[in-house]
Amino acid sequence: MADYRVPLKDMSFVLYDVLQADEMWQSLPSLADQVDRDTADSILQECAKIAEQEIAPLLRVGDEVGVSFNEGKVTTAPGYKEAFQTYVEGGWTGLGGLPEYGGMGMPKIITALHEEMLCGGDIAFSLYPGLTAGAGLSLAKHGSDELKETYLTKMISGEWTGSMCLTESHAGSDLGMIRTKAVPQEDGSYRVTGNKIFITAGEHDLAENIVHLVLAKLPDAPAGPRGISLFLVPKINVNDDGSLGEANGVSCGSIEHKMGIHGSATCVMNFDDAKGYLVGEVNKGLACMFTMMNFERVGVGIQAIGSAERSYQNALEYAKERIQGRSLTGAKSPDTAADSILVHGDVRRMLLNMKALNEGSRALSSYISMQLDYSTYAEGEAQKRGDTLAALLTPIAKAFFTDIGFESTVAGQQVFGGHGFIREWGQEQLVRDTRITQIYEGTNGIQAMDLLARKVVASKGTMFTVFADEVKAFISAEQSAEMAEFVGPLAEALADLQQLTDTLVAGSQKDPNMLGTAANDYLHVFGYTAMAYIWARMAKAALAKQDSGDDFYQSKIKTARYYFARLLPRRISLINTASQASDVLFDIEEDLF
């Protein structure tokens, strides 16, 4: 397996040449004193070192040794604890945390690139600090000052970690069916009892305490999702002076044996009359948890980007070195027994698919992260617009990035041929590890329904219009001859997406099942179109520097051409299938399946 190298130059290009993130930071008073270009560059450079030197080497041992379970205790793979301690000592657990509780307060567009580095190194390792950061977000926004002082400070410092406890064996995505109960106590605390499954980092040996955010219902709670509350339940109770006290009624019943991410502890968690504390308001727990879940869903998309990038680096190195056959136009290396497999059109197709999708995903992920930053730090119309775009595009980040990220890991495996099926080269692990990203944090089918039904149709297309108007403004402003090859196809793709959106908004009024049958295809049409927008912006930025003599910009321009010629047309067949009525699916009776 090739040594993982963080694509710092591409990250810098996206940040500054394409998105002008440094200008955004200085335009927002709440960020202007927090981050500038020098600060961001220093952070990313240092994070690249720890990702390459400390985390990436754990990928194989995390997979082959994994986590172990013995009498309720979980032990992580060799090297994990030491790497996590190095990570904590560097202050990385507090990168996006609130400064008043010890964090650095960096915007999401920085923490997102940081996350990609970790995931390119080892997705399984990244989940331990990732879940802690997500839990910290919910606690920061909805927790009381007392809870934040006691728990958030320790989570940001990395002394304690966090988990998110939603799923139960009978209640996966339908959280309204949960049975975990919380009974109020005279001292203002609650006693939480129930069982949760699939809990990432629910138990491990990396930190002395684990702070669980648990969804539960009060005895008199309304039925369904309207009756869910959120509770903070520590593994070990905390004394009034902040020291650790007695063990709480929290235990790990077992760990799951999974297809991939073996280095991540996926736990069955038992809460037996455990002491907990309300986070936010009674019966408003789902809204509190979604603060975390929206950021986590973008984070899951980033997991796939990181893994796909590592797959591409491995496959590219292998393709350059592996000699097999000759070019169809004659030998390119006549002094050797064969040419490298890079001369073969199908190998180039796979590598360029990976390159174009990876770079497009990185740029689009950064754009979505920027919208989250506007939503968090801006005011007025800028805040409202950022909030709308972030909500609209979060399902794209989670589902589209993970679908094409998995595609890229499989393509990387295919470049290796038979060697890709063998553990020695590491490609099959990337396929297995990335597969989960399409499933957890809400399956990709649910994300597609969220986009089409809850965002586009429920708003009668107004949320979509915010995005479409921005793309139209870009197209109108970029009418130069050199941009025509990018702007023309983008305009056509946007017009097609607009027409499909109008068709589905209108058609679903008469045929509600159309939402479910069209959602997945619609999300991918949207994803390819949104990526075309960001690729056009990257082409513009690269064209401005094409005479610099740096091959990076020539590569970027040619990859943009490839995207528009070979990948954007995928949307055409998707539009055709998404436009069909639902009867072809629902006219088949169950006993005919």
Image (cartoon, rainbow, N blue to C red):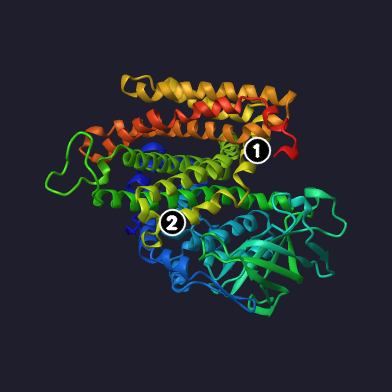
Residue 7 seen: no
Residue displayed at 57% across by 42% down: 394
Residue 487 seen: yes
Viewer-closest of 506 and 157: 506
Task: Read off the residue under disc 2.
Answer: 428
Between disc 2 and disc 1, the foreground one is: 2
Q: Is residue 371 above or below residue 56?
A: above
Quadrant for the N terminus in the image: bottom left
Q: Residues within 10 Å of mark 2 (few under 14, many from 20)?
A: many
The residue furthest left is 335
Q: Is residue 152 above or below residue 332?
A: below
Viewer-closest of 160 and 531: 531
Residue displayed at 40% across by 33% down: 535
Q: Residues under labels 2 and 1: Cα distance?
A: 31 Å
Residue displayed at 80% across by 66% down: 188
Whole-percent x, y for residue 336 in the image: 15, 49
The residue furthest right is 220
Quadrant for the C terminus in the image: top right
Helix or strand or loop: what does disc 2 sit on? Answer: helix
Q: Kindly indicate whether the residue at mark 1 contacts the one at mark 2 (C-beta within 8 angstroms).
A: no
Residue 449, disc: 1
Q: Earlier in the sequence, mark 2 or mark 1?
A: 2
Amino acid type of the residue that numbered disc 1 sits on in the rendered structure: Met
Whole-percent x, y for residue 258 in the image: 56, 62
| 584 with respect to 542 (left or right) | right
Whole-percent x, y for residue 409 in the image: 43, 49
| 438 with respect to 180 (left or right) | left
